[in-house]
Amino acid sequence: MSTITNCATASLAPYVPSAESPWNLERVRHLYRRLGFGATPDQLDVALEENPIDLVNYILDGAVNQALPEPPVWADWSVSDYNNFEEEFFDQYVDWMVQFMTSARDNGPLERLTIFWHNHFVTQFETYSCPSLMYTYHRLLQQYAFGDFKEFVFQIGETPAMLFFLNGFENTRFSPNENYARELFELFTLGENNVYTQEDIVEASRALTGWNGWTEFCAPIEWAPWGYADGEKTIFGRTGNWDHQGLIDVMFEERSNEIAQLVCSKLYAYYVNPAVDEEIVEGMAQTFLANDFQIEPVLRQLFRSEHFFDESNFATIVKSPIDNILMFHREVAFPEFDEQMQWAFWAAAHLGMQLMEPPDVA
């Protein structure tokens, strides 16, 4: 198997245009394609006249402050609220994803980061098949996309889509289910087989019990004290009557460096280069820790850096189906007909990238 090499030599210092590294069309396109889904010809012309640091700040400010979409009428529906659930639920899912892709085409950075978090905190629509649960999950991804990662981890563990997908609603004091605890460590925070033990997983699963109050298909999952495993648990060498919040607190106190490294490494591979530069990731991780796990400062540092604009990081990432479709649509300035986004959604699905339907938890 061949090894991918990262040849970029620039640092995380702010990018300053020079004769060797000019602010040109190639770098402008690189910024818009990595941060969002490309730029229109008019945007490129304007961007060339801007200071690159000011432009990055402007784009990120817009994404951070972007209003989230209004909830659909079915946002809190349970199955009993439908006239014909079997006929209506799939159309609602598709309509919401088409609306998301339309926003991605018109805006971009928030939606691109939302896709990253969906690929990180994975759930599958087919597992729970409820538009209301999908909406709650999707809104959470957008709400915390640039925000507090620690709170993000906590909230994702109690969102119904995740409770169904990784069996949290089946996790009780009578029969602890280790599925979510294992993926919480392995995929979401620490990395595979990294600074945790099987006993940590067992005890964490007990701390996560109690989200068992499920009364109707598509209804919210409520806290049910009868399911909670009260009593002491020992996790990462610390003993206490840890519940879900206690588990998250202990994890971020005892394993902060590992969490920062994993998240920053994945952000780097997603936005910059699949051949991860460990020195750059270490700098990002220190920024993450210094800002109490706020995501925005890390991305702002990365996108303003000379490393990001190093030409060795150009054309290093294979475009996904959605990248190809939305970038082509935006960069050739097609008329913005929403009917095209219905086509775009299904085209991406046929190419193997159906939103909210990743192939597996990894």
Image (tube, helix red, strand yellow):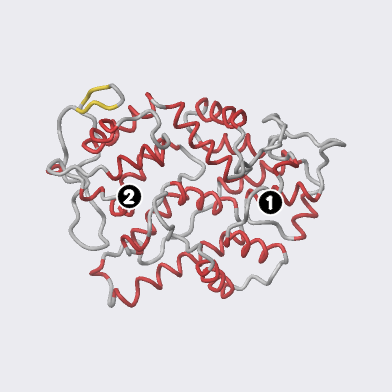
Q: Amino acid at mark 2?
A: Thr
In the picture, measured across the screen, residue 197 lies left or right of residue 7, that is: left
The answer to whether 12 is drawn above or below residue 361 in the figure is above
Q: Are the two marked residues, 1 and 2, in contact with CB atoms closer than 8 angstroms?
A: no
In the picture, the disc for residue 214 is none
Secondary structure category for the residue under label 2 = loop
Secondary structure category for the residue under label 1 = helix
Q: Nearer the viewer, residue 18 or 40?
A: 18
Q: Badge 2 local density, few (<14 within 10 Å), some, or many (20+)?
A: some
Q: Badge 1 local density, few (<14 within 10 Å), some, or many (20+)?
A: many
Distance Cα–Cα, label 1 vs label 2: 32 Å
Which quarter shows the N terminus? top right
Residue 344 x, y percent position in the rendering? 56, 69
In the picture, the disc for residue 159 is 2
Residue 222 x, y percent position in the rendering? 22, 50
Closer to the chain start, of discs 1 and 2, is: 1
Determine which residue is flagged by label 1: 32
Q: Residue at x 57, y 61 (%)?
A: 322
Q: How many marks?
A: 2
Q: Amino acid at mark 1?
A: Tyr
Q: Residue at x 70, y 57 (%)?
A: 39
Residue 180 x, y percent position in the rendering? 30, 44
Q: Quadrant of residue 325?
A: bottom right
